[in-house]
Amino acid sequence: MLPKNIILPNFSSVIKTVKNNALIAVYKHPKDFPDSFVARLFISRYPTRYCVVRKTYDELFSIKPKGMCVVPRDDDDDPVIVESWL
């Protein structure tokens, strides 16, 4: 289990340090934020405490780091996962 979330306004401060190992998973109404969309930073395949929380998908998408591509969810992903950013 991860320690308490660190909610960021965007990923610009942390994405520079992880560079090519970064993946951001986008969630719609996960258990810990049932009324929000959440983008959580992963390093390699491991989740971190760093996330951005917004009320709508469009608000969340507006903070997607430049240069990251949208990867659609896989059928085997948890149903609350919308997509990933690589």
Image: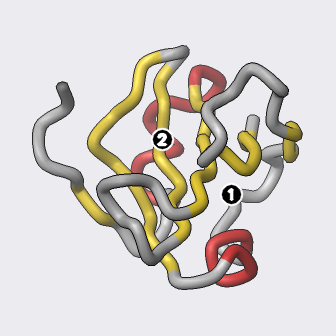
Q: Quadrant of residue 60?
A: bottom right
Q: Secondary structure at mark 1?
A: loop
Are the residues tagged 1 and 2 within 8 Å (C-beta)? no
Residue that label 1 marks? 65
Quarter of the figure that contains the N terminus: top left
At x 65%, y 24%, the residue is 20
Residue 6 placement, left or right of 28: left
In this rendered view, identify the residue nearer to me: 81 or 59. 81
Measure the C-alpha gap from mark 1 to mark 2: 11 Å
Task: Give residue 66's position: percent from left, percent from top.
Answer: 77, 58
Q: Secondary structure at mark 2?
A: strand
At x 13%, y 48%, the residue is 4
In this rendered view, identify the residue nearer to me: 23 or 36. 36
Q: Is residue 11 above or below residue 36?
A: above
Disc nearer the start of the sequence (1/2): 2
User: Mark on residue 23?
Assistant: none
Label count reads 2
Residue 68 placement, left or right of 19: right
Q: Quadrant of residue 75?
A: top right
In this rendered view, identify the residue nearer to me: 29 or 18. 29
Within 10 Å of disc 1 (Cα), the crowding (few <14, some 14-19, many 20+) is: some
Q: Quadrant of residue 79?
A: top right
At x 75%, y 35%, the residue is 86
Q: Is residue 77 above or below residue 29?
A: above
- Type of residue at label 1? Pro
Of all residues, the one furthest to the left in this rendering is: 3
At x 87%, y 40%, the residue is 72
- Type of residue at label 2? Leu
User: Mark on residue 41?
Assistant: 2
Of all residues, the one furthest to the top in this rendering is: 45
Task: Give residue 67's position: percent from left, percent from top.
Answer: 82, 49
Task: Give residue 81's position: percent from left, percent from top.
Answer: 65, 44
